[in-house]
């Protein structure tokens, strides 16, 4: 034994630092750590995004998102049943639109029989108790991969908003519970709210992608819905500059004024400061999107044996709760729900 330890022991209570506060006392055992724990992750915090493809009995792996698959509608229904069994409150859909159906104006977005609408109807018929959320934006449907109408290299705001209102109505008719505009056009929340109310969809919620940044972390998602090769230029004239914080609060304020029921910050982990500011500043239901690139980063490292993927998954999700989020959209939803159910 080192001499210092021996002499500390032999001189008894007098040895060592004279400290009134020893924070380690609360951490000394599992029972104590559980008692003082400030935040918990539960299954009620989860929204699970799913990718939908044409076909039947089809499950297609996504190379840049190992463990995540594109699913045909019948398989989406199976997963929705699993989500409901696990107690996941809501799921959300993103379509892989057949390339032949993509055009410059994203007209497939307005087809009431498109993949997303069929998935909504099928899930609502089979699993009525689960919440269904659908994305409103044109990018899965446009040949250029942008969220809005493109004219001479510019994204047209007001013309796009008119289409987004139509897209919202078509999704509401299919039975969606939450409309989630992810396009970042100005004024779209107000226009969609008015359109829904006029058509009698007063109870359809709006979760605004209020603070959505122009982020590198969407890369794998664009592979998943097949827009990465097509995308002309970037989305920086409508998605936010990662350098900005105060601007996010302004976006949130506008979306709430326009009628949003809840707001989202996206991506998640690199923007925890924004989540905290939004929650503290507005006190409204605030969600985080742990996006495809965040998922891919953890999985890539885990699959290389460079970190413990299970622990990184739980730690990253808990961080959203600590930052003030009420819930998280995450591709880990079923995996973490299984784990929570097992009591781990
Ligand atoms: C489309 C949309 C995107 C995501 C959700 N909705 C991509 C984008 O804006 O390019 C990203 C989700 C993810 O990366 O997991 N408007």
Image: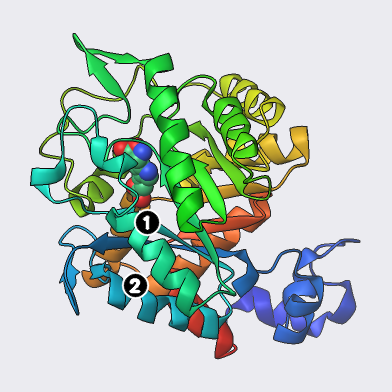
**Label at residue 76:** 2
In the picture, measured across the screen, residue 86 lies left or right of residue 252, that is left
Residue 138 is situated, as x and y percent measured from the top left of the image, at 31, 35
Residue 313 is situated, as x and y percent measured from the top left of the image, at 45, 67
Against 30, residue 200 (above or below) is above
Q: Check the image and name the residue furthest to the bottom.
A: 342
- Nearest the eye: 99 or 299: 99
- Nearer to us of marks 2 and 1 is 1
**Label at residue 99:** none
**Sequence-first disc among 2 and 1:** 2
Secondary structure of the residue carrying numbered label 2:
helix
Against 74, residue 93 (above or below) is above
Residue 279 is situated, as x and y percent measured from the top left of the image, at 71, 41
In the picture, measured across the screen, residue 180 lies left or right of residue 61, that is right
For the question of whether residue 267 can be seen, the reply is no
In the picture, measured across the screen, residue 344 lies left or right of residue 13, that is left
**Label at residue 117:** 1
- Nearest the eye: 280 or 110: 110
Name the residue located 44 percent from the left edge and 71 percent from the top edge: 123
Name the residue located 28 percent from the left edge and 57 percent from the top edge: 115
Secondary structure of the residue carrying numbered label 1:
helix
Q: Check the image and name the residue furthest to the right.
A: 20
Against 86, residue 267 (above or below) is above
The quadrant where residue 312 appears: bottom left
In the picture, measured across the screen, residue 264 lies left or right of residue 242, that is right
Q: Quadrant of the C terminus?
A: bottom right
Q: Is mark 1 within 8 Å of ligand 1?
A: no
Residue 230 is situated, as x and y percent measured from the top left of the image, at 12, 35
Classify 10 Å Cα crowding around label 2: few (below 14), some (14-19), many (20 and above): many
- Nearest the eye: 300 or 14: 300
């Amino acid at each position: 034994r080192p001499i210092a330890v021996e002499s500390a022991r032999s001189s008894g209570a007098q040895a060592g630092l004279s400290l009134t506060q020893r924070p380690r006392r609360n951490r000394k055992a599992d029972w104590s750590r559980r008692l003082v724990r400030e935040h918990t992750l539960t299954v009620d915090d989860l929204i699970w995004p799913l990718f939908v493809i044409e076909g039947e009995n089809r499950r297609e792996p996504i190379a840049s998102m190992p463990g995540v698959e594109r699913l045909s509608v019948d398989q989406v229904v199976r997963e929705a049943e699993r989500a409901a069994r696990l107690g996941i409150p809501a799921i959300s859909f993103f379509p892989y639109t057949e390339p032949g159906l993509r055009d410059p104006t994203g007209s497939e977005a307005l087809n009431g029989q498109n993949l997303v609408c069929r998935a909504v109807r099928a899930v609502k018929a089979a699993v009525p108790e689960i919440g269904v959320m659908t994305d409103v934006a044109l990018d899965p449907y446009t040949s250029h991969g942008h969220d809005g109408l493109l004219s001479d290299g510019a994204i047209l705001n007001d013309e796009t908003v008119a289409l987004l209102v139509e897209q919202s109505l078509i999704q509401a008719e299919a039975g969606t519970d939450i409309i989630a505009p992810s396009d970042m056009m100005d004024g779209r929340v107000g226009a969609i709210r008015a359109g829904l109310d006029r058509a009698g969809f007063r109870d359809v919620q709006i979760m605004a992608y209020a603070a959505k940044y122009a982020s590198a972390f969407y890369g794998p998602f664009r592979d998943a819905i097949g827009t990465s090769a097509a995308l002309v230029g970037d989305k920086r004239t409508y998605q936010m500059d990662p350098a900005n914080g105060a601007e996010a609060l302004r976006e949130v304020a506008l979306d709430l004024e326009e009628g949003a029921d809840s707001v989202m910050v996206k991506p998640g982990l690199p923007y925890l400061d924004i989540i905290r500011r939004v929650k503290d500043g507005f006190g409204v239901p605030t969600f985080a999107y742990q996006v495809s690139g965040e998922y891919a980063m953890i999985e890539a490292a885990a699959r290389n044996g460079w970190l413990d993927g299970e622990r990184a998954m739980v730690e990253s999700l808990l961080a959203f709760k600590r930052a003030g989020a009420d819930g998280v959209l995450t591709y880990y939803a079923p995996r973490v729900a299984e784990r929570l159910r097992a009591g781990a």
